[in-house]
Structures are given as C-alpha cells and as structure tokens.
Image (cartoon, rainbow, N blue to C red):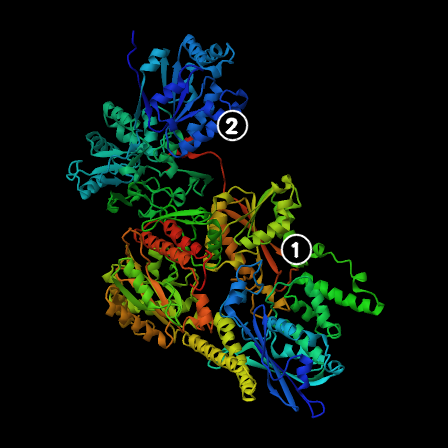
Amino acid sequence: MFLTISTTGTAERPATDLGFLLHKHPEKVQAFSTSHGVAHVLYPEASAGRCTAALLLEVDPVALVRKGRGKGRGGAPDSALGQYVNDRPYAASSLLAVALAAVFRTALRGVCDALPGRADQALPLRIEVPAVAARGGTELVKRLFEPLGWTVAAESVPLDTQFPEWGESRYVRLTLDGELRLADALRHLYVLLPVLDGAKHYWVAPDEVDKLLRAGEGWLENHPEQQLITARYFSRRWSLAREARERLELARLAEADDVEPEAIDNAVDEESDTEEKPVPLAVQRREAILGALRDAGASRVLDLGCGQGQLVGALLKDTRFTEIVGVDVSVRALTVAARRLKLDRMGERQAARVRLRQGALTYTDATLKGYDAAVLSEVIEHLDLRRLPALEYAVFGAARPATVVVTTPNVEYNVRWETLPAGHVRHSDHRFEWSREEFRTWAEAVAARHGYAVTYAPVGDDDPEVGPPTQMAVFRKTASENASNTPSNPAKEAAA
Amino acid sequence: MTPTPRTLAVPDLSLVVLIGTTGSGKSTFARQHFKPTEVISSDFCRGLVADDENDQSASGDAFDLVHYIAGKRLAAGRLTVIDATSVQPEARKQLVRIAREHDVLPVAIVLDVEERVCIERNAGRPDRAGMPKHVIPRQRRELRRGLRGLEREGFRKVHLLKGAAEVDAAEVVLEKRFNDLTHLTGPFDIIGDIHGCASELKSLLTKLGYEDGVHPAGRTAVFVGDLVDRGPDTPGVLRRVMSMVEAGSALCVPGNHENKLARYLKGRNVQHTHGLAETIEQLDAETDEFRARVGEFIDGLVSHYVLDGGRLVVCHAGLPAKYHGRQSGRVRSHALYGDTTGETDEYGLPVRYPWAEDYRGRAAVVYGHTPVPDATWLNNTICLDTGCVFGGKLTALRWPERELVDVEAEQVWYEPVKPLRTEAPGGAEGRPLDLGDVQGRRIIQTNHHGRISVREENAAAALEVMSRFALDPRLLPYLPPTMAPTATSKEDGYLEHPAEAFAEFRDAGVRQVMCEEKHMGSRAVALVCRDEAATAKRFGITGVSGALYTRTGRPFFDDAEKTEALLDRVRKAATAAGLWDEYATDWLLLDAELLPWSLKAGGLLRSQYAAVGAAAGAALPTAVTALEQAAARGVPEVADLLARHRERAADAAAFTDAYRRYCWPVDGLDGVRLAPFQLLATEGASHAALPHDQQLALLDRLAEHDGSGLLRRTGRLVVDTEDEASVAEGVKWWLDLTADGGEGMVVKPLQALVRDANNRLVQPGVKVRGREYLRIIYGPEYTRPDQLQRLRQRFLGHKRSLALREHALGLEALDRLAAGEPLWRVHEAVFAVLALESEPVDPRL
C-alpha cells in the first residue's frame, strides 16, 4: 500500500517544508509499527522546488489472515481478510487510512510548532495513490473529491491485460491536485479511502461516530455525498449510519444554536425502529392467503418455505389457527424467523401453537401428513423445473393436506414493473416465472393427478391486459376418503 | 406328592405377564427362568422413580416406566417379562395393549400360590413389614376372579400354576414363532399369484427344473398365495401345491383369496365375486374329502415367513419391516391384504398405500397381490404378481440368485376390472426420497471404514444445497471426496514436496505408487449413458442422456444443451473404444477434471485472483520507483526496503502468471477439455479397486478414440517408494511438471484400495501441489522465508481424517450402486459426503 504527497515551493518557501509539516525528516527513512504491519515514510524527492513524501505500508498477510480467523471476537468484519489471496497488502483501504492517522497524527490535527501558521495555510498539493480500492469506480472518486476542491485524475486499473474481456478492476489510480491545507488533505484521505473501499478491517464501534465527526469537521456537513459517505464509513451498519446522519443534522442545528450536540440529540431509540418497511404486495399476498385459509376452515396449517416467518406471524395473530408449522430449508431464515417472532420470549400457550423446523420439499416428510392446509407462498419458483415433480409429490401426494394454497409471480405483469429490466426475473434466485396460462396448466395437471380441485384468484392490482402481479391457486382435496380399512369390508376384500 | 414337572411353552418373542399376589414368588420365578435383563419389575421401577420400592404413591409413575421400557424392548424384538402382581384386569389390559402395539403375543403365567405361603414369605422381608394384613387376601380374591377371563382379555397362551410346588417344578421352554424359518436357506424359487392357472404352473415348475414337484438340486418352491379363483383349474393348482407342501418341497403363504375361500368352505356367507364363483363351481366337482383337505390346508397357512437368516421375507401383499416376524391380527391382515390409504379410486377400489416406497428394511420382501406387467425391484422389495390369469405371465424369483423366470399366460383367463398398472407400485416419476433418509444426526455403516457419523448441523447445510441447487438424487450416484495434501515439507522454499508423499506411502507399506498429473480445472463427475432410453431405464429420468455435475452436485453448465453436447462427445469416444460391450453396461460414471479453471471459476477469478494481481501490479512498481528515487538521492537505509519491494513485485507478477495458466477463453465447447482420471462404475460393478495403471490405460483408450478433442490424457509415473533412484525420478518428474506452473500431482497407491498393517484404510491419494501454483492458495508472497516459516505450522489431521471418511462414503455409494441397492441407500452415502464437506477444515489444505 502506497501513497505520495507532493508539494512545490520556491527558494523562500522551500517545498521541503513539507517535512516540518508532516513532522518527518526528508533525509531519513522512518519506520512505524502499526497493528497490521510496518509503515515507512521516505522522500523520493526533496528539493526546494519539489518535495514528495511517500507512505509505504507493508502489511503482513499471514498475520492478517490469522487475525481475521474466527468471526466475532478478534475476527474481522471483512470476510476477504480470511484469505491469503487478498488485495489488502496492495490496495489503499482502511488499513492505510489508519496508518496515515497514526504516522501523521500531529499533521492531521493541523499543528506545526516548527513553522507556526504554515499549517493553517493552503499549499499546492498533489496526492498520488497508485491503487485505491473504489467500489463505484472513477466516477464515484470524482464525486467524493471534487466537491472538496481537488482536481481529480482517476484511471481504472484493468483486471488483467492478458484478458481484456474481463474488464476493469475495482482499483483506481488516483491523482489529486489542489491548493488545500495539509491537515484537510489528510483528513479527506482518512475518511474517504475506507469509504471508497466500502469495507473495514476492524469492527465498527460506537466511537466511530465521534471519529467521523472529528475527521469530517468543516467539510463533511455540506458534502453533497454526505449520506453515502456516512453509510459506507460504517460499513452498512444501518443503525449506526442513521445515528451519525441524524447527529450530523443535529450537529448543524446545535452549531447554529451554539450548544453541545448532545443537548439536542437524545431521542433516538435504536431498538424500536428495526422492522423493515412493509412491501404492499407482500401484505396483499398475506391477506389473500389468510382469506383462503379462513374460507377453507383450516386451523392446522403448514407454511412450506416460511422464509423469515412473516406469514407465520400473521397466522399467529388469528386464534383460529391452532397449529402453525413453518418449514424452510434455510437454517439462516429459520433463525431470523425465530428472532422476529420472538419465539424464545413467547408465552407457553402462544408458543405451543407454532413450530419452526428445517425441511426440504424435494423430499417426502412423514411429519407433514394430516394438516388442514399447506401454503406455498412464492416458493415453487425457487426450485428448478426438473425438481418440481418432487415437490408436487411431497406436498400433494405424500403430505396431502385438505387445502393447498400456492402463490407465484405472474411473469406477464413484469412489463408493469418500471424498475425491472425487460426479460429479467424479479429475484435472482427465481428459476422460472410463469404466465397465467403456464401456472394454470401446471395446477390443473397436479390437481388431476392427486385428486384435488383448483380455483384461482388474483393478488394485487388485476391489470386487464397482463393480469395481477401475483397469481394464487387454491387446491381442495376431492378424493373420497373413508376411514374403513379393506379387510373389515367384505365387499372389497377380494378385490385383487 | 411331587407334582409332575410342567413345561411352559413361551414364544421366543412375546410379552410374558406374571400374575400372582405379593409374596407368590414371581421375582424368584422370573430369575430362575429368564435373563435378568428380560425382566421388568414394578418394584424396581418404583425404586427408580421414588427411591423406595414399596412407595405405593409412586405406582402411577412406576408403571409408566414399566410400560415405556417394555415398549422399547418389544420394538427392538426382545422377549420381555413383566414382574408385577397384575392381578387386576385394568393392569393386564394395558399390558395386552402394549403387546398388540408391538405385534407380539401376550402370554400369561399365573402363580396361584397358597395364601399361607405368601404371608410367610412376606414376613421374612423386613421391607414389607408395614404391609397391611388384608392386602394378600384381597389380591388373591382379585386373581381368582380374573382367572377364567384371561384368554378373553387377549392372552394367547395362559399357563396356570397351582400351588407353590407346581411353581417350583415348572420349566419354561422358548419356542420359535411359526413364521420364523430363518434356519432355512433354500435355495428358493418364489412363485407369484397363480389364480387357478394350473397349466402355466406346470410349465413354470418344469422351466424351474422341478420333476413331479421335486427339484433334483433340493430347491424349495415358495408360493406367495392367491393360488385360487378366476382361473380354469383351481383344484389342479391346489392339488399340486398341497402335495408339494406336504412333501416338504414347498412352502406356501396364504393370499386374500385363500382366506375368503376358507370362509366359504366353513359355510360363511361370502359374496361369490372376484372369481370365487369359478372356484366354487370347480370344487363342486371334487369330493367332500378334497374340499375338507383344502379347508385344513388353508387354515394351517402362516401369514408370512422370515427365511434365509432373516435376509428374505415372503408374504402375499407385502409387509413393512416392523411387522417382520411379528404375530398379530394386523400383521396377518397386512400380509394378506396390504395397506390402503382409506381413499377409493375411480373404479371404486381401495387405493393401496405405496408401502414399498417407504420400505427401508434390510430383508428383501417378495410378494404378489397387485398385478403388474413386469416384476421390478423397489427398495429391496419385488412384486411377483404379473397377472397370469389376466393374460400376463406367471413369474418366479430364484433366491438367492435374484433371477426372474417366467412363462407367458396361455390365454386371457379372466378380464381385469381395470387395466394393469404400468409399473410396480411406487417408483413413478417425481416420487422423491424421504427426509428421514438424510436429515439429522446420522450414522452410515460402510464396508471399508466402519461407522461414519454425520453431525446434525452438517446434514442441515447439505440439505440446503442438495435441495436447492443439486441435481435429482437419481442422477447423482456419487460425489467426489476431498483429498489431503502431503505432509508439510521442510525443504527450503517449499511448502509441499513429493519426498514426504513417497515416504508416507512407504511407511504405510505401500511400495508402488502412481503419480498422476493434476489437471488444474474444476472437479466434474460425468454420468454418461448410451442414450436417453438407457438413462430412463437405469436411473428413471427421462429427457437426458446423463449428467455432468460439480463436487456439490450442481449441474456444471446451466445450459442443458451444452451438457448433452459434452456427454455426446464422451459417448462417441466410449462407443469407438468399445467400452459398452466390454463392460456390458449402458452407462459409465467418470471422475474427471474439467478445464479451463476459468470456465467455472470465472467469477472468483475476476473478483479475487485477478483483482489481487491488478492491485499489486498497480501499487508495487510505483513503490519501487519511489524507493529507487530515494536511493538515487542517497537517502540512507533505503537499500533493504528497495530490495524487498523488488522481490515483492516479482512475487506478485509470478502470482498473476500462476493463475493465467489456468485461464483461456472458450466458445461453446471449443476450448473445453475433460480429463477423466477414474472410471468409477458401470452397470453392476464398482471400479474403485481397479489398479490405477489399468484405470489410466483404460482412460487413455477413451481419449485416443475421442475425435472431438475434448478428452485429455493424464500424465503419470509409477514410483517404487523403496527404491531411491525411483523416488528421485519421481521428484524430478514433479519438479519438471510444476516448474512451468503445473498444478502438481496426486500420489496414489497403485493398487487403489489398500490397507495398512493395522488393517486400516490407507489414504487413497495425497496431493503434492507445485510451488508456483500454491501462490494461488497461500498468496503471492508466500514463498518469502518469514511467511513460509509460519505457513508450515498447518495441521493436516482433520483434513486427512475427513479425506478418509469421504473416500469410504464414496466407495460405499459405488458399492451400493453396483449392487443395485435402493436409491435411498445410495443417496444416503452421497448426501453424507456433501454433509462432511461442510465440516470446518482449513480450506487451503
């Protein structure tokens, strides 16, 4: 990891003053130990006309991996750090930002006892970073640095010149030119290098907010990309990002009011506002399913492919559903569902109504037999078409609930989604999306094979031309069932 | 006067209920006649739950425990004796219920001992001193009242011992169950439903080699029932079968039609439907004596037989494993009529429950009852009713040969109510395996490595991948195991080196090893069938001619046409090489490497490998230039830093070169190469034990006959681990191979399947990866001495254990596949490989 800071000067104001401002002697190589390796400061050129300071951070990749091992305590938030093949030793990122802050601590504060006053003055500066990890590319680099008064030259590094078809890497060769105070330049780098990278090598702690406010003082408040900067700085930790944004806004008010920000900023309750915003179609779909289940008079219900448990939660609110079993193949989804439903804190009587368990609909499952109804909401399209007969048999042939409710996207409606590019499915894991006719063809065949009758209902706005966004089929078992077993029934006894 | 010794017959699997007052000597009796573990004492259970064997307030819990233990023992098929007073009918009723639940016979042994004796015995036991005086007389009254009703309560045998002397003189004799013929080993010829087709029976017996009802080689015929009704000559069939059974050259189980005929012969009112009318008419022409003999014969039939050491079960309508060797009304009913779902079909006939789909027993079940066009195995069960009377054929199964022998029906003797099913019960398209076959903690018994356990969390992860991304289990008969690297080298500049691999095998007693060039691509398993029909016939999947999948069972290509095109190239080579006939197979299962690496790993290459190369390539030369400027300027102490960064820059360039060798552009299948290194299996045979030189020779032939340029030959060298010159040659071969970036080699015991001096499985191979290649694994600069030093501290134990376990599971899957075992058995082993792959192990090994 490497960057250089250059300035120009005259005989009266030699460029080598940079050494005083940085508190590093131009004729020496100095080494500083940081938590992830050794930082060297040296000057490739140091004349009165031009002086360049270089910061070279030698990262120890083996130590990085060993530190990165084990999530949680001592582990790194960036999973890439668990790899030996890792761009961290080469590309400028939060590691370099931390080293920069450590090595140039005094300069970052804008203090220079040797040349009093110079630290407060703008200098002609050129900053070069040969490889900056930049998610968002050269364009984002410009959006971040240009508003701060820099002239930005940014050039993407190709992934591999031998394979031009692979395109460009996420690294940018960056050159910044401008007349700025050195401390500001350093603080820009300190905040924006990790922001461009979008990942941090350490866990974001609550004091990060204070660090950002300190380093961003005087320039971040009015930066047009302020929202992106704060969000990225906290590595997509939304609750913290929100706190920081609110605090920035409040900080401005506090500034205007000449009071401490804490005097104003004291109303945020992190815990209360974590529910994701409901998607209207998902709500409509749940209502349609609940209606179908109530019409069927079902009380013992399977939610097959329950995901994060939204439907299970809705079923729990209606006491007519006495037994609710959520089944999903993803253990992660079940964990989230259990947390959302607060299963561990639920009262005994409520908890007895609901169970979550792992299951896979490509296998038959004896424990799913004998229920009033099963719901397959937005499930079938997540299965390869060739595996669909297995699901069909597991649900309609083996589990055989009295009612089966199936919902799936109506692909015809996709043209009405403005945000969906033509020919794209709605979710990257959708293995297929069916037209109304395709869905009905499948449903009729399933019903005929397994002794069910099927009816259909639209979910969401039923467009006259392309139909509703979601299509729903309700299967009711029709095959006659009598409890008597053959041997006790002489008429059928010798049937074979 | 000494009473004559009484012999008490007790079936070897039954629930024996001792009945007697306190002090009647039940515990002593139980001790004398049964194993201590067979006896469950209510007193003992009272002690377990209440620390006091006489605490009557704990009786409720104590009996719950008695019943629970009894249930567990009976479910496991173990004789169980209940040592409690059991003088009250309610107490006995619960025990009879438990016996019925587990389909064993309840047996009562009553110890009707004089009051005086009981009181005397209790007086001798200080712990019973506090027992009120009225207890024994009351219990005795209850006992006496209940005596006459014991049979009615459900006890199938009642032994009454009157007085202490008779109790002392009694002797318990365990007798075999009627259905237990495990001592008979055949060989057998099991014959399907005959339905009065006497002529076809005669032809079949002749074809099977019987001469006048006797087989010269001493084989035994076994009839699965439904001898009678519908056909032209029921008396003729009965005469033949009865005489063979009487002569001891045949066994017979009853069918539902025999059962109904017996009821008719006893004068019961039964409907003359389903072909009974024809039988009645034919029997009317026979003598009363003959009819009486038929009635007796049918009454004497046992509902099912367990034969050949428990490996074979024969009954009429099929039987789940939990009913094998059991005795109860419902076992008999299931054996004769099968199970139904409770639903009726469009012909008004009951819908049969597809019990064979659920069958997971180790005994083969051979049955009839449901007419099918062809007899086929499903989950180790086979239905032999091929509808002879409906114009089909009469089928026999030779056991243990498992060969089918049949004769065509001479004509349609009887019109069926509904058309014959197009296939055996179960096995239809789309019917999946059961979650119970794979979920949760599991233990898999393997031929080569004992019991291998799969942890619940690993099974959960495998379930997710298997059900969301993998191919249908029918197309997935094998997943490749992981392979451990060689022990870490101490050689300067090397992390892995062949010397350790050769030494390891030498120490394990393996003299000859095969070094195989490692192709750097992506692992691929290819199931290549002769054509779509062959896939449908053997694997039950239509519309494809095989499969090509990755190490987690995902299809290699999203594009089905591309897969077919690739399979077709392999198929043509196999045809040209004559492999189909040579192995008498319609399919080949190949373990291979598919190249280039960039084909499947393109995303990873770009996001990780090429990215690192790009970042290093941008940063390091710039740093070097700056250092050179500083050095040129005379800044002291910059020389070391400069030298080190020049080396780092060179390492980074070497890293880029390393991955570039495994990347090249492809267009369709142009540029795609497949390097097979093992033919895993063909019909009826696992080739996992075929020595590797023969394996590679075989695959060379395949490659030579490939006109498409798809197949790639594997470079090899045989090394004698005891011969220094040969080892040196092996090292040199590896050095040459890896000098220009080859991935390295795999060293395998030449004989493929080898055990060491302790009879433990030897590693099937270890990989020795090239110095340059390892940059892709351990980072561009791993060869720097300080890094190498630390990287040498790697721990291979878990990886090696994992490699062996997965290897054994892979072998197991192939063995099961070759033996034609049920799909669930093959899938169990395949699934376990995937589950083990989710164990936490250093991914760089």
Q: Look at mark 1 in the image and give the residue it sits on.
A: A284
Mark 2 neighbour density, 10 Å: few (under 14) some (14–19) many (20 or more): some
Marks 1 and 2 share the same chain: no
Q: Is residue B73 visible?
A: yes
Element at label 2: helix
Where's the N terminus of chain B, which quadrant? top left
Across and down, in percent, residue B609 comes to 48, 73
Residue at the top extreme, as displayed:
B1
Mark 1–mark 2 distance (CA, rounded to whole Å): 55 Å
Identify residue type, mark 2: Val
Residue A222 percent coordinates (x, y)? 75, 74
Q: Chain of mark 2?
A: B
SS category of the residue bearing label 1: helix
Regarding residue B665, the answer to whether it shows in the image is no
Q: Which of the 4 quarters of the picture holds residue B74? A: top left
Viewport quadrant of the C terminus of chain B: bottom left
Q: Eyeballing the image, is B527 above or below B11? A: below
Task: State left or right for residue A166 relative to residue B337.
Answer: right
* Residue at far right of view: A257
Q: Is residue A366 left or right of residue A213?
A: left
For residue B108, above or below residue A161: above
> Where is residue A44 shown, x and y percent of the image?
58, 85
Task: Give the residue type that dot 1 points to.
Answer: Gln
- The foreground one among A448 and B480 is B480
- Give the letter of the chain under mark 1: A
Where on the picture, by quarter, is residue B805?
A: bottom left
Q: Residue at x 33, y 59 (%)?
A: B533
**Nearer-the-camera pick, B138 or A51:** A51
Q: Is residue B108 above or below residue B275?
A: above
Q: Please identify, in this view, whether the residue under mark 1 or under mark 2 is nearer the observer.
A: 2
Q: How many numbered marks does the figure carry? A: 2
Q: Which residue is mark 2?
A: B49
